[in-house]
Image: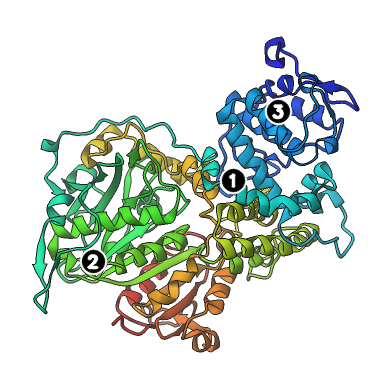
Amino acid sequence: MGAADSGLCPTLRGEKVVAVADFVDCPIGAGDRSAASSQVTQSGPSPSWLPLVTSTIPSPQSPTLLPSPTSTSSRSSRSDLSFILLFHLYLTPEAAPFSWQPSSRHLTGWNNLYFLKDCLGPATMKSSLALALLVGGAIASGPQQQVLREPVDHPQAAETPLQKISDIFGHLSEQAGNVWEDVMDKFPDTLMDAITQTPPPKKHNRRPDSEWDHIVRGSDVQAVWVEGDAGEKHRKVGGRLDTYDLRVKAVDPSNLGVDTVKQYSGYLDDNENDKHLFYWFFESRNDPKNDPVVLWLNGGPGCSSLTGLFLELGPSSITKQLKVEYNEFSWNSNASVIFLDQPVNVGYSYSSSSVSNTQAAAKDVYALLTLFFEQFPEYSRQDFHIAGESYAGHYIPVFASEIMSHSHRNINLKSILVGNGLTDPLSQYPHYRPMACGEGGYPAVLSSSSCQAMDNALPRCLAMIQACYNTESRWSCVPASIYCNNALIGPYQRSGMNPYDVRSKCEGGSLCYTQLDDISKYLNRNAVMESLGAEVSSYESCNMDINRNFLFQGDWMQPYMRVVPTLLAQMPVLIYAGDADFICNWLGNKAWTEALEYPGHNEFAAAEMKNLTSQNHEDVRVIGQVKSAGNFTFMRLFGGGHMVPMDQPEASLEFFNRWLGGEWSDKSP
């Protein structure tokens, strides 16, 4: 009889013998986590490091970059716990803090895997093994943890997350390092897929074709051939489009009152993979026949771009009374803007499949833009730009590269803009400690002991990121994400301060901003969903399944700055940052732009940071700093947090319009 059947979990005390089957059958959910923890602490430190390796057991001591779910199923808990057992048994079972007597057999080394497979079942086994190997990589990678260089008032506060792992596994680090390369050779990448999960399909009701004003068939677009200048035949537009359709609804501006301009909403359908991406287009308030078109992307990964629409730079915001409030500084003042919910299963988008890396998402975005401009050729003739923030620092360079890879296209891409983005983790992560500890232009948030702990953790973190850069393998990149996020971002998150604005505390609500809850309530109204043609039963601002899947596919630490040099040879690139943000702070963004290796590196690195002065006022108003050389520009915006258009709406619209007008950078060829 297993422990789950008896209602009792075995006590781990001294040399007491327990059966593995009994141990893994104990469900550990949010309600009984403390009891289980107290049992383990009798033979070793509390396993409070568990959130380092899985997002399914949240802990206020080790928060993730985005909020974790507040509860867990017994199935996922069983998987999480069995991972601990597997890691012990796989390396050296005699090093475990308690004894084993599984079915009266003595199991060693790889033989243990077969026992656990029978005990746990194939699905749990695969998931547990993948997690175990990731922790092995985290322990094996990088230099040994440094000793604190100065005394601290509270040693426990300065303890780094990995110390807890080291306490539990003791002398296993050296052995893990010896076997790690062999492990990566023996286990295929498909094993990592055991961790990533396709979430249950959102409840949805697909509307009949008769309810849409336009439907563009990708197969029809794909079938069009044209003759080139030299008489050669080629497809009108490149890329595989035959599986895609675009549905378009003309939104009646009077229904919602968000803006009076022409609007379209709808879905890009990937019929082969059952993916449906939602978009909402607003025409320029000024001169839509000549003004540029901009695609706006929020980050996450897994957060809706309708957040940017209503919280930052769209035509209206949402009040606490769920009323729309006109935004005079909307970015569609002088440009037409498309807000896209991507990847699938974000916002109003839905799918029975999943996207868990940036490259896969790029194919969908290219298809959407191609079909949209095919339906509306009047916009395809305008200059086109891609803008976004946060994890869009990953998205945008890759999306732009995908567009430019097609020699025959109807997308007139002229520049990209990334705000407070994550693009080069190797340059970004060394600047979390300075930003949190008073070196970024604002008072320190953390104590000296916490700052010292972050300094101590940095060498290992950088070594792990470098390993990810060298291999671009999930087996290297996932451990780097897990360790670095907890060691260098975790201390700040535990402070209770807003990671998106070092000047304020986290207000509660979704991602520290209660306004996001108001936006979600508004977008869940039946009248709103009906007006937009939304097909899902509910809207949420961020999808944590997507966030986790991107992380466990190794996407988080990927060196996407490597595609920027090619883009710089083709178009201007703007990296801007509000200087009060912690999570993607201006120090790190400035650092990676100055470190980027490309033909114009020396010229850009030597360029002076100059005052950015507003041109909209008679008196002199300095709104930031800017440095520029060739096609590359970095901009620091004073008083802006992670979401610059929300904190500094007037200044953000000004720099946006000046950028679209060609200031600072060379014109694109």
567 or 151: nearer the eye?
567
Badge 1 vs badge 3, beta-carbon distance below 8 Å: no
Q: Earlier in the sequence, mark 2 or mark 3?
A: 3
Residue located at (17% from left, 47% from top): 248
- Above-or-below relation of 334 to 170: below
The label nearer to you, 2 versus 3, is 2
Alpha carbons under labels 1 and 3: distance apart: 31 Å
Residue 425 location (% of width, % of height): 57, 64
Q: Which residue is mark 1?
A: 187
Q: Which quarter of the rendered picture does the C terminus lie within? A: bottom left
Please name the colour scheme applied to the rendered image: rainbow
Where, by quadrant of the figure, is residue 504 drawn? bottom right
Q: Is residue 67 visible?
A: yes
Q: Which residue is mark 3?
A: 33
Q: Secondary structure at mark 3?
A: helix
Residue 433 location (% of width, % of height): 69, 63
Residue 11 location (% of width, % of height): 82, 22
Q: Secondary structure at mark 2?
A: loop
For the residue marked with disc 2, what is the amino acid? Ile
Q: Which quarter of the rendered picture does the N terminus lie within? A: top right
Where, by quadrant of the figure, is residue 572 drawn? bottom left
Q: Which residue is mark 2?
A: 411
408 or 190: nearer the eye?
190
Residue located at (34% from left, 63% from top): 402
